Amino acid sequence: MMTSTKANSGRRVRLKNEHIALAFDRRTGELVELCNNRTGENLLKNWSAHRSMPFCLLLANAAGETLKLVAPTYHQVLSDPGLSPAFQEAGDGAAQNSLTITYPRLYTEKGAVDIQVEITVSLPQNDEESIWEMQLTCGESFNEVLDGARIHEVRFPCVFGLYHGRSWKDDTLVYPFNSGEKIVNPVETYARTPAEVGWKWQQYKYRYYRDGIATTIDDDGAHFREYRYSGPLSMMWLDYYEQEQGFYLASYDPAMPVSALHAETFGPDKPGMGFYIAKYPDLRPGDSWSSAPAGVAVHPGDWHWGADRYRGWHHASTGSADTAPDPDWLQCSSGLVAHYDFKYQSGDIVHRFSDLGRLYAEAQEMGLNDLLLSGWHIDGFDHGFPQYRPDPDLGTTDELCAQIAAVHEHGGRVGFYINSRLVNRKYNELSELVERAGVHNLAGELKTECYGDDDIEFAVMSPNEEEWRERVFDAVRFLAQEAGADFVYLDQLAMSPPQLCRERGSQQGIDWWNAGYRKLLEKIRHELDIAVFYEGVSDIHGPQANGQLISTFFYHYTGAFPELYRYTFPAQRLIDMVYPERGQAMRPVHISQASREMIDRAFMTGCYLWAYDLEDENSFRDDPQMMAYLKDVIALRRHWLKTWGLGEFRDDVAFTWLTPKGTSAKHFALNEKSDLLVIADASDSGRWSVWFDTRGRSVARAHIYRLGLPDKAEPLEISQHDGNAVELHDKPVELHDACAAPLAIVCLEYTEPDN
């Protein structure tokens, strides 16, 4: 039923429930308040003339100009009353209220434009989250004013000038770049120029950042990060929070098209954060478009609230709560040894197929049974794409197959690198494939990229073109059915940016990139008996894969936070690289200096390990001390998997107290009868205490398994408190070598409840 309230008869139109209140300017339709009704605080604290809420449209015309269309301003409405928005309220207050705002026309410096925007905000009762939707209608005449323009980007909902409480300094942003990044005080961190570290390995040139985070500065002076989904953006939600309160923004689009999340600030001189969701509908005169729902919430607590909310939507809407079934060998596997040194980009050969037995024996010494081979195919790594057949310089196909079979006889597994994205333009015989299936922008220009040697140019291929998908599938089929491979690694699939392009002969929009990779992975999963790993992490593709490479080493100093994705989708396997402290040239020195920290983090978050073994480049065999430490970590991880399985990652939400400073803990739920707690005492004190919420269960016993002693179960001192929490006390222990950190696994076993 339609309602009209006295409260909405003034200059501001309000929509509220017990938790959240929104207010819009009646004359312009601008969002002016976003309030936490528990505290009365308005989170919008800094208005800017450079920004408008709640939406922005970007148009590109034939001359290449980009124009912005936003909600009309006060003076524009006074000059042209036809721009004034209309408000309509609905709901009876029992379950949900909603507000629809219709902007009949929009205004540019060239005059009013025949584009209508309708926004509906729904606010369920007793919920911290509001749901936002947009209807966009393009009049037949709008580009007569704008010279053939098309709407190529919609930013909605837009929220700017936001921070919590009295100061922005204690606010934290989690943003789903790769597996996640966690930025404390982003208002100041975004605006600070980070230290840049250059590094060269072979012909590869890298830039790393430290003491800050890399942002882009727009024409208005805002520092921002914006990445596209999927790859490098892994999910479509973010959370900006402090101790008592959080702001959550999410896109709920089961079609999962190419989209983006934008986070920005003008810095501490104009404090506040701004956020929006970007979509790419590519609209022309006469077109209409409906957005998927978006969530805007003001919630109590930290980012775990947002992860729980997004996970709930994702599982309900996509039906993808389950992941690809693991082969038996992978369920108890701790990691792989990667050999990128068969044939390098330069053509240099380090290993041949006949070396496979020796390489496997060296991996076994580390406690690992899985080998990944790169540079195995014609013309080698980062050169011979997509010539995915064995390089005759390395041996024959029969020899490779025999070597793989021999590794199998000794309990090992072998996987192979394939690039899912690139074609080397030197192959003239593939020029027609590149023309048909390569990525061309809307101007018809081919997208190319270089990696390593700048003289080697690669065409970027579209996964939405069936001919390219079939080419990649054929390479995987060869490995699975003819070579006997156990797994395949698809490089770049969920890490390199998706492209906006119109497929040849397709009537689809420009934002369907993700759909092509979904088809490829589904085909591999349904037709081939092979495990699939890929680079990057994605909630679109994760359910179709057995492992996703997150490479936190690159972002270790700039907020790497794999817990964000790991907690949101705990059933999916993440893979992380680990490095020695000494003797490796592949990565810069500051990566080696954090070797132990990265190994510990991978263990604590339950990651599958990726260790390189490159002759004279990157090998733990050149660092005996860290090799010993890594072997102990692998041994403890193997005991974990063999004894309890993966468990469900629950992060640290059940821990209420940890001492001493430097102690960290993670929780893996097993079942109602037991839990695993993974403990690391970075202070090296040899004694720690933690409080853990048992959810009313009584602990019957607790045993600890220590690094270096994975098979020895020691009883742990426990104190039960009020039936809900247990306090665990470790005793001082003598570290078994000078390098070892007191990593440990605690298994809690609960008493059976009385019937």
Image (cartoon, grey):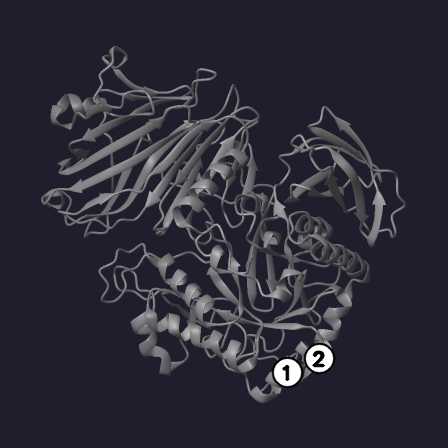
The answer to whether residue 231 is visible is yes
Location of the N terminus (image quadrant) = top left
The percent position of residue 269, horizontal first and vertical second, equals 47, 26
Q: Amino acid under label 2?
A: Gly
Location of the C terminus (image quadrant) = top right
Q: CA distance from mark 2 to mark 1?
A: 9 Å
The percent position of residue 154, horizontal first and vertical second, equals 29, 42
The residue shown at (25%, 58%) is 508
The percent position of residue 607, horizontal first and vertical second, equals 63, 53
Q: How many marks?
A: 2
The residue shown at (64%, 59%) is 587
The residue shown at (64%, 49%) is 647
The residue shown at (79%, 40%) is 702
Residue at the far right in the pictured view: 734
Q: Which residue carries the number 1 mark?
A: 353
The percent position of residue 217, horizontal first and vertical second, equals 42, 41
Q: Is residue 186 left or right of residue 720?
A: left
Q: Which residue carries the number 2 mark?
A: 357
Residue 238, compared with residue 16, is above or below; it is below
